[in-house]
Image (tube, rainbow, N blue to C red):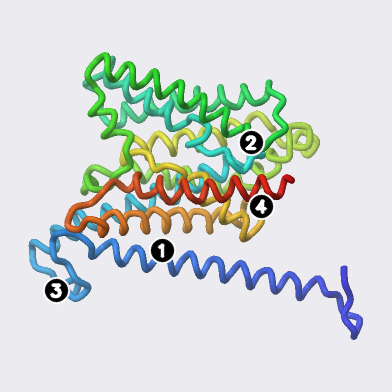
Amino acid sequence: MTTTADGRSGAAPTRVRRRGVQRRHVAVALAALVLAAFASLFLGVSDLTPADLVDPDEAQARVLWTSRVPRLLAILLAGSAMAVAGLVMMHLTRNRFVSPQTAGTTEWVGLGIVVATLWFGGTSVLGKMSIGVLFALAGTAFFVWLLQRMVLTDVVVVPLVGILLGGVVSAATTFLAYRFDLLQSMDVWMNGDFSGVLAGRYELLWLVLAATVVAYLWADRFSVAGMGESFAINLGVPYTRVVMVGLAIASVVTAIVVVSVGSIPFLGLVVPNLVTLAMGDNLRRVLPVTALTGAAFVLACDVLARTIRYPYEVPVGMIGGVIGGVLFIWLLLRARKRAL
């Protein structure tokens, strides 16, 4: 602790400056979110301008409430929830490069969807989502079990294990889809795309909002569990139960998002890393900003997807994969440089 010339502690000004920086981060995230949301509402083949919101005709009102608003809500819900899921997994595994995309969770959901389509073809979207959740839970639990029995000293090796495991699962999924002529259906399920989001087809995504709230309420427990099993037990935190809740949140969120809009590569990895690099590792403090930044990231990708080949659009997952891949490489190089 430092002391100023008049004898006062320097800790208080430091905390004030830190809070000011955090508020600026929140303000920047909110501003980016609002700008991207505004652009998203008025982009599309159908003409719709801000002035039309004052007194829209029947066609404009139908476009707004049937397509544009549901699409915007789906983007906000999916982006924020996947970013939070990645943040939770990063803390529980104590590795910055673990996320639903690098732990194989997304691939397990895809396998669950194919199995549900083959053996429960008449089931509803909710049924497919439930089976996807079960497969995601089993696959993520297996990944954590595998990590606990391996001695890994390099921070980069852990996500590589998850990527290899996900590759095996993806190969099995592709084989089943090819064998039973489901490749096109699998591509539709797995490729992140919001062009088909309409009123009545996205409402399952509201469930991820509940999962995000649970993650915030359990944030302190996740932080303690992230310190290690012995540390958590010494503080009276039920380590196994907390880890299972965290993995359940990540699995449920991933399954719902993949079933509803498809997979968005690297979202749950790069966003939590960028936020924690800027704000630190206090989970309760960074979780809201992570949610806002995740939503802003997907919105920005959506705006790019609709403007690159206007009036056509490319899948959001493709844009997210390119941008997220570049950021992932930068994070890897940064981690390697700091380790040397």
Label 4 or label 2, whichever comes before in sequence order: 2
Q: Are marks 2 and 1 in contact (CB under 8 Å)?
A: no
Residue bearing mark 3: 55
- In what element is the residue under mark 2? helix
Q: Please say if 247 is above or below 277.
A: above
Residue bearing mark 1: 33
Q: Nearer the viewer, residue 146 or 26?
A: 146
Q: Position of residue 138 (x, y in %)?
A: 50, 22
Q: Position of residue 230 (x, y in %)?
A: 78, 32
**What amino acid does circle 2 point to?**
Thr
**What amino acid does circle 3 point to?**
Asp
Q: Residue at x 39, y 18 (%)?
A: 172
Q: Are marks 4 and 2 in contact (CB under 8 Å)?
A: no
Q: Nearer the viewer, residue 165 or 30?
A: 165
Residue depth check, mark 3 versus mark 4: number of the one nearer the observer: 4
| Relative side of 55 to 255, left or right | left
- In what element is the residue under mark 3? loop
Residue bearing mark 4: 281
Compute the Cα span from label 3 to label 4.
47 Å
Compute the Cα span from label 3 to label 1.
25 Å
Q: Are marks 2 and 3 in contact (CB under 8 Å)?
A: no
- In what element is the residue under mark 1? helix
Residue bearing mark 2: 93
**What amino acid does circle 1 point to?**
Leu
Q: Residue at x 46, y 48 (%)?
A: 324
**What amino acid does circle 4 point to?**
Asp
Q: Residue at x 27, y 52 (%)?
A: 71
- In what element is the residue under mark 4? loop
Label 2 or label 1, whichever comes before in sequence order: 1
Placement of the N terminus among the 4 image quadrants: bottom right
Q: Nearer the viewer, residue 324 or 276?
A: 324
Q: Where residue 176 is drawn, which disc sits there? A: none
